[in-house]
Amino acid sequence: NVFMVLIVVIIPFLVQLTLIGCSRRISFNKVDMIHKTVCVYFMAIGLTQALTNFAKLYCGYFRPVFLDLCQPDENWECTASSNELHQGRVSFVSGHASLSICGTLLFSYFLVDTYGHKAFQKANPTAGEESVGLRRIGSVFCYAPMLVGYFIGTLLASCCQSESNCQIKCFLTVFRLL
């Protein structure tokens, strides 16, 4: 889980900040772009994790290994700790899928907004995520958690990115009028 967060959130975030700092293509204030990047990443990742965890607690179902985690006795009562039972109940909505697609889409949106579609085609960060996800969907018998996780991550990354673009453009317009 730590490696996934490192690969799909922290590294793209740091690369994006580095590209902003070193780029000559960014036409307006770099401090505003860094502020926007930090706000978008924290808002999108935070909302994605919050919505995913809410969905897991509200409508999560048993994992396929729940009985192994539960270790029922002869009366079919679980003997495992409450933490193990909790982990066995939160299968629906894949947190890995929602977080990974959200992180890679945020970086992809930055590449398209800043460098255009050709840069995105050359360095498509979502291609690896999509291939891993499709392979997992095909190999796991329960594909609904992965698909709903992808939907949540895509929805929140798109909403946060488009909302921040609107806010930045409005801010710059008002700043120019003053």
Image (cartoon, rainbow, N blue to C red):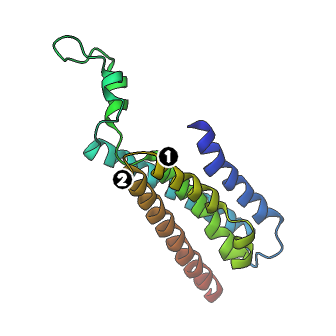
Residue visible at 47% across and 58% down in the picture:
153
Instruction: Find disc 2 in the rendering and name its residue.
Output: 144
Can residue 116 be seen from the camera position used here?
Answer: no
Local crowd size for mark 1, using a 10 Å CA cut-off: few (<14), some (14–19), many (≥20): many
Q: Quadrant of the N terminus?
A: top right
Mark positioned earlier in the residue sequence (1 or 2): 1
Q: Position of residue 152 (x, y in %)?
A: 42, 59
Q: Amino acid at mark 1?
A: His
**In which quarter of the view is residue 57 placed?**
top left
Q: Position of residue 94 (x, y in %)?
A: 42, 47
For the view shown, which residue lies furthest in the top direction?
74
- Which amino acid, mark 2? Ala
From the viewer's perspective, is residue 149 above or below residue 114? Answer: above
Residue 147 picture quarter: bottom left
> 34 or 56, which lies in front?
56
Measured in 3D between alpha carbons, the distance from the residue under mark 1 to the one under mark 2, in whole angstroms, is 13 Å
